[in-house]
Amino acid sequence: MPDRPIDLRSDTVTKPTAAMRRAMAQAEVGDDVYGEDPTVNRLEERAAELVGKEAALFVPSGTMGNTIAIKLHTRHGQEVICEARSHVFNYELAMTAWFAGCLARPIATEDGILDWRAIEPAIRPPGPHWAPTGLIVLENTHNMAGGTVYPVATFREVCERAHALGIKVHLDGARLFNAAVYLKRPVRELAESADTVMFCLSKGLGAPAGSVLVGPREAIAEARLYRKRLGGGMRQAGVLAAAGLIALDEMRDRLEEDHENARAVAEILREVPGVTIPHRVETNIVIVDVSATGVPAEHLSQELRRRGVLINPVGPWRLRVVTHYDVTREECLRAAQMLAGVVAHLRRTEGGS
Ligand SMILES: Cc1ncc(COP(=O)(O)O)c(C=O)c1O
């Protein structure tokens, strides 16, 4: 394997930039549990302003941001509507049940985009037999559906209809800035009708750690207590927030490059016999379906790793390619060609279909 593998497993693997490391070294810090870290305070103000909400809370991870939001909006014994492949349902250790005491009500979609037509039949009013719907969680961009983006009108309609029924909407916007860049709209427009929004600094924006939960002032004050309960009071967290500020101010516009690279990868892979790209490629994620090759995704992933390309399987017949600023256009193309070559080789030598 070469010294530096081409790492397309996730945009979480990005390392802090030189500017981030400088800002981290020089960050003014204090005890954030006392609200005395000036850099964390600046990050929270900046995040709230960008997303267009009253207040923000710096949290260690996206999972913690979602966990707190679900707890804020629900009571024990309610249901939380989410998409079937959503992160909150599949990859957050059942925190909806564990922390908020709620049942997830997943709804399957083709492309990860939950519209009101899909949601409405799943809404449960209070009654003698069923758990009432407490919250709807939408994911923009949708990770496992290949980074798909909510049309602004679809998102707004869900929020308006939910609000009319007294149901809150939380936006899992781990990659919300990718969506904003794709739509060429300010991020606040995408967040406007949601009650709370979580976004990650540590994915395509490149910060080493941290996410932000934004929403109404009162809700965020309560969220601060839940963060402490979950062990997320980080003291001199300004060292991390300093990188987060750079992420917000310097790393957003370049996300378009990642999207172009993802499209270029998809273009190469679409030509490979047996390989399909089941979703629109709108942002920095490409889901690759290899079922028609007869070669399992795990096997392909291992063969690629031996050749210096890291791509994760996300199911028996699917791989996920995620582009980010730590991989160049040339490396993305090389990885896609390598995948094409490995598929062809294994089909020949191992008799895949
Ligand atoms: C859509 C989505 N939401 C939430 C998260 C959770 O973020 P973290 O890994 O920081 O807990 C992720 C992480 O990949 C994600 O893709």
Image (cartoon, rainbow, N blue to C red):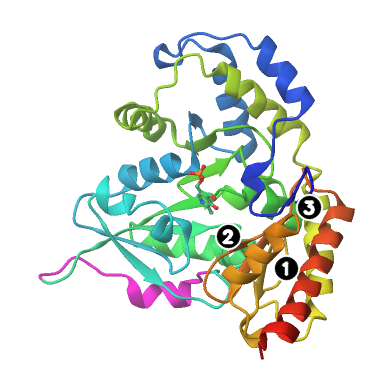
First in sequence: mark 3 vs mark 2: 2
> In the drawing, what numbered circle is on residue 258?
3
| Residues drawn in magenta | 114-128
Q: Nearer the viewer, residue 163 or 24?
A: 24
Left or right: 218 as drawn, with respect to 62: left
Crowding near the residue tagged with mark 3, few <14, some 14–19, many ≥20 C-alpha atoms within 10 Å: many
Magenta segment: does it hold 145?
A: no
Crowding near the residue tagged with mark 2, few <14, some 14–19, many ≥20 C-alpha atoms within 10 Å: many
Crowding near the residue tagged with mark 1, few <14, some 14–19, many ≥20 C-alpha atoms within 10 Å: many
Q: Quadrant of residue 311?
A: bottom right
Q: Return the x and y of residue 126 as percentages of the image width and height.
A: 19, 65
Q: Nearer the viewer, residue 289 or 192?
A: 289
Residue depicted at x 44% and y 36%: 216
Secondary structure of the residue carrying numbered label 2: loop
Secondary structure of the residue carrying numbered label 1: loop
Picture layout, residue 61 above or below residue 77: above
Residue sitting farthest toward the bottom: 353
Q: Return the x and y of residue 258 as percentages of the image width and height.
A: 78, 52
Disc 3 vs disc 1: Cβ atoms closer than 8 Å?
A: no
> Between marks 3 and 1, how big is the CA–CA gap?
11 Å
- Kind of residue sitting beneath label 1: Val
Circle 1 residue: 281
Circle 2 residue: 143
Residue 42 visible from this viewpoint: no
**Label 2 near ligand 1 (CB < 8 Å):** yes
Q: How many marks?
A: 3
Left or right: 10 as drawn, with respect to 235: right
> Between marks 2 and 1, how big is the CA–CA gap?
11 Å
First in sequence: mark 2 vs mark 1: 2
Disc 2 vs disc 1: Cβ atoms closer than 8 Å?
A: no
Secondary structure of the residue carrying numbered label 3: helix
